[in-house]
Image (tube, rainbow, N blue to C red):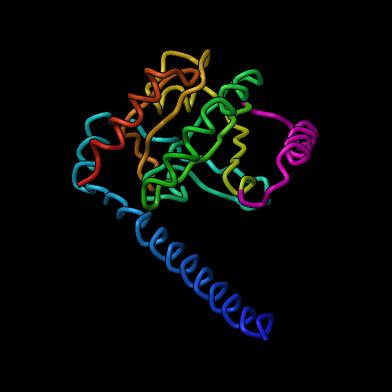
Amino acid sequence: MKQHSIQPLFSLALLTALLMVFALNAAARTGTKQPPKPRWDMAKIARMAKATGHLFPRKKGEDLNGTARRLPGALPGTVNLVLVGFKREQSKLFKKWSPTITTLMRGYRNLDYVWMPVFGDRNRVLRYFITNGMKKRITSKWARRRTLLMFHDQSLFVKGLGLKGNGQMVLCVTDSKGRVIATILGAATPGKIAKLKAILKGITK
């Protein structure tokens, strides 16, 4: 008789425990609700872009999914972080910026990025080998869509972006039309990351 009386009590205790777990999980989800993402101040973005006067050249490129994209527009976000590289070794700097960019994209609505290596004029054979070599390293369709290969004179980009030369990779903060709001040269350092964060915060409402 005692064994039969213990079993219902055990079942009731287990049920109570499970209900408590569900209640705690629900409370945790409610407590960790994400704050709303800041909204872009489009008027301020337009003023800052006009002040710099810098714009990507009117040239066509192709992403690693094979989709043709024409600059200065055709950028994926309302605001974009476009990393422009002119030399092979500068691709390492893109990798160092990646964690910061990933974190920032989670915190802002319609913030996106593009990795834009500018190779200069190349014949079709070299373009084929360069493109396929990059496809082997970048397999995600999502990342391929954001890797835009440009086979045009580098000086057009240097001039359009207001650079002194092609010796450094540049991170351009742009609007969707390819108008440059601000630029940051070189590798990701604590100071440059802080500068990028301040730029983005400064163009939100």
User: x%, y% of residue 61?
Assistant: 59, 42
Answer with left or right where residue 44 lies relative to residue 33.
Answer: left
User: x%, y% of residue 144?
Assistant: 64, 46
Residue at left offset 36%, top offset 29%? 196
* Location of residue 12 with respect to 122 vertically, above or below: below
Viewer-nearest residue: 180 or 68: 180
- Is residue 56 magenta-colored? no
Q: What stretch is highlighted in magenta?
A: 120-142
Answer with left or right where residue 193 lies relative to residue 86.
Answer: left
Residue at left offset 40%, top offset 25%? 193
Residue at left offset 51%, top offset 47%? 70
* Location of residue 7 with respect to 58 vertically, above or below: below
Which quarter of the image is occupied by the N terminus?
bottom right
Answer with left or right where residue 32 lies relative to residue 86.
Answer: left
Number of disc labels? 0
- Is residue 131 magenta-colored? yes
Viewer-nearest residue: 121 or 200: 200
Viewer-nearest residue: 34 or 160: 34
User: x%, y% of residue 197?
Assistant: 33, 31
Q: In which quarter of the image is residue 119?
A: top right
Residue found at the very far front of the displayed protein = 1
User: x%, y% of residue 167?
Assistant: 53, 13
Most common secondary structure along the magenta stretch: helix
Q: Quadrant of residue 178?
A: top left
Answer with left or right where residue 202 lies relative to residue 72.
Answer: left
